[in-house]
Image (cartoon, grey):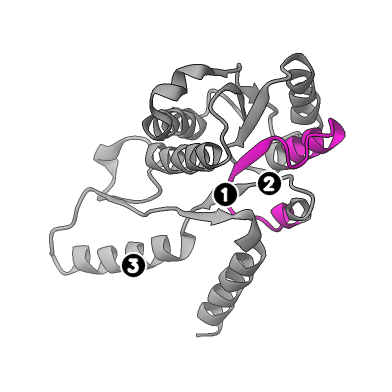
Amino acid sequence: MKDPKNRTAYVGTDNTLAGADLGKQAAKKMKADGITKGTISIVCVDRAQPTMILREKGVKAGFKEVMGVDANNFKWLETIQDKDQAAVSKEQLEGQLTANKDLVTVFSLGSEGPDVGVMEAIKSQGKAGKVLHFGFDYTPTWEKGIDNGLITGIVDQDAYNIGVQVIKNLDKTVKGEKIDSTIPIDVKYVEAKDIVSYGKEKEKQMTKETKD
């Protein structure tokens, strides 16, 4: 619902903050790896989509906050959009990798197209394990890139907690209790090495709740 006046409250992900978390985690990893300069790419489904705009804004802000003065040593390329077509993002990112030998990090901001396209481009250009890749939202697709160094880490929206908080706050509203107009739910950062186990835990959680 776009108009806040037409809703009682919003429960869910703050995409700017979620993007900032991803940007911060990327900067921490890069600093730990001694990466203090280079070129960065962002890949999304649609640059005009409000969700993607907020995530990109957050990524850049979070990255700058943690990277500090060294943030000025990095160049952000024009954001790639693929309309959720992996072949499109693969081709465009391959072009960026070829034209920018100092490309060190890629952010994919959600959906299967960018996720797959980025991993395939990194692999085809022989950059696996050399170019860091940070993604948005858990999907089993990530598991295909872990052993090959095609994904570094992701932030994942907590859909389960969002659902819980929706019901809790709906109950409060029915009872006449006052609730906040915005109830943000934090995302979770998951390193590549933990993605498989994280996915299994999510599956167990959803299966348990379905049975209950």
In the rendered image of this protein, does residue 194 appear above or below residue 181?
below
Mark 2 residue type: Ile
Badge 2 vs badge 1, beta-carbon distance below 8 Å:
yes
Which segment did they paint magenta?
116-143
Residue at x 64% of width, y 43% of height: 111
Mark 1 residue type: Ile
In percent of width and height, residue 56 lies at 49, 29
In the rendered image of this protein, does residue 149 appear above or below residue 178?
above
**Quadrant position of residue 44:** top right
- The crowding category of the residue bearing disc 2, from other C-alpha atoms within 10 Å (few below 14, some 14 to 19, many at least 20), is many
Q: Is residue 162 magenta?
A: no
Callout 3 secondary element: helix
Q: Mark yes or no: residue 44 visible.
A: no
Q: Where is mark 1, residue-wise?
A: 154
The answer to which of 33 and 2 lies nearer the viewer is 33
Q: Is residue 121 magenta?
A: yes
Tell me the CA gap for discs 3 and 1.
Answer: 27 Å
Q: Where is mark 3, residue-wise?
A: 167
Q: Where is mark 2, residue-wise?
A: 151
**Quadrant position of residue 195:** bottom right
Residue at x 33% of width, y 67% of height: 167
The answer to which of 47 and 168 lies nearer the viewer is 47
